[in-house]
Image (cartoon, helix red, strand yellow):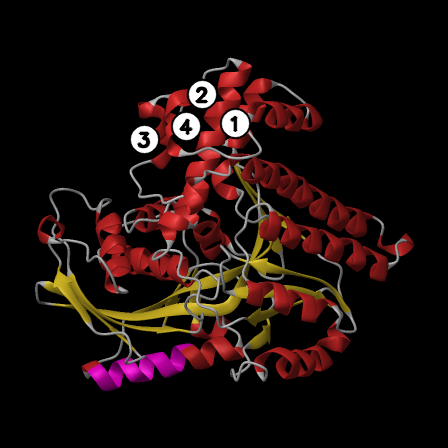
Amino acid sequence: MAIPQNKVSQLSASQRMKVSNLAALFSEKFNKSPELVIRAPGRVNIIGEHIDYSGFGVLPMAIDHDILIAVSKTEDEYVSVFNVEESYKPVRFTKNIQNLEISESGWERYLQSSYKCALSLLPADLQPVGYQALVSGTIPPGAGLSSSAALVVSMVLTTAVMNNIPISQSELIRLGIKSEHDVGVLCGGMDQSISVLGLQSHLLNIEFSPPSTTPVSLPDSATFVIANTKVVSDKHTIAPMQYNLRVCEMRIGCFLIAKYLRIRIDEPVTLKRVWAISGLSRVEFENVIRTAVDVGGYDEESVVRLLGKDVFENCKNGMEVKPVNGKFKVYDRCIHVMRESERVEKFIGVCKEWELNKATQDEIMVLKDLGELMNQSHESLDLLFECSHSRLNELCALSRIQAGCFGSRLTGAGWGGSTVSLLQPEMVETFVKNVAESYYEKYGLVPEIFVSKATGGACIINL
């Protein structure tokens, strides 16, 4: 599908104000008006964490917090990108991608990788244009709300539009994913998908194998409150010991299970694909995991001995990985992925049942069922996938004891970042006050808690 185009008049009041403010700042800085504004939202994942790169479906929603880029063509040989936040240094690079090298650090590497990916669609007989852009963002960096995905999606789209390159939603997702891969993170695709495909007032069940999206309606009173621990989760910096390591561990698990079952597995190497090829039921496949995979984990020597050096290098997929205490904890990771994927199915099932039988169901009990699945998800992420953090655990525990809270879990990659809690709407004000006092005041932090409704995905805003 084509990228949506909106007029400013079609935006919500808060979005109109953000766009208007950014356009004014652009005019002040460059002495001309921007040609248009590009928007890409962040996301909160309601359930289904660390399972997208294993081929399983997830259930996120796009949020109000977003990245906006105001942009206009220039006559020079450069792309110049500024940020309204002065802590982000201006970035200027050649529009000629043959001479463009991606920086090793800083926000410029996302801009450069996205630019190069977008221009891969430019016909060879055409030359790229120079442009100047001003970026504003309301997604807290490192909060687990996909600020990096929103940035690469918005930059790919900006570059495509400036160069009159037709781009579909599926191409935008693909290039957004590649942009993050090119800066060193083996992301699975959820963040870019929801940033592009977000749907007003709905969660989106995103499936990857085969690709599909299905809107999911919630009970009318379901309200999600996001709270930032203020522990920065920079998955790109710590990827070798955390994010990329988990991807590697899951790939090792796939090959171990395939070896045990005597089946051949090629790309894409995902647990869902191994399960599908096996033809086993969920219970039978989990029993195979228990038999085929050592609960105690593996050191590198053991992996190489069991699978071979080439397969181990395949599992690393060209990325640096540093197993904590020298152990690849494959069993725990695989069990988490299987059970988390089942929780996604159950969550969707509860929502569908509510949609079909509202008249006969107790809405509070439905919210309790959804909240319990969120709680179970967090426990698994903490104990089996080991991607939580003491502050995340503390904030979830404080949230769960508040009146009107049905469940709370980490959202995003983990190791810091944010929690998402399911509440009754009339209890939100009290919840925010109590959590601010019990968590943020304790650590001397400025509270960052907000309610967000599901919003639409990436779009072109015509001024």
Q: How far across and down, in percent of the image, does residue 358 sit?
A: 84, 54
Q: Which residues are magenta?
A: 19-29
Residue drawn at the location 30% of the way across and 55% of the way down: 156
Q: Mark 1 and mark 4 in contact? Answer it, CB < 8 Å.
A: no
How many residues crowd around disc 4 within 10 Å: few (fewer than 14), some, or many (20 or more)? some
What is the three-letter code of the residue carrying label 4?
A: Val
- Which numbered marker is on residue 265? 2
**Residue 188 visible in the picture:** no
- Which numbered marker is on residue 273? 1
Eye-nearest disc, 3 or 4: 4
- Which numbered marker is on residue 313? 3
Q: CA distance from mark 2 to mark 4?
A: 17 Å
Q: CA distance from mark 1 to mark 3?
A: 20 Å
Most prominent secondary structure in the magenta stretch? Answer: helix
What is the three-letter code of the residue carrying label 3?
A: Glu
Q: Residue furthest right?
A: 360
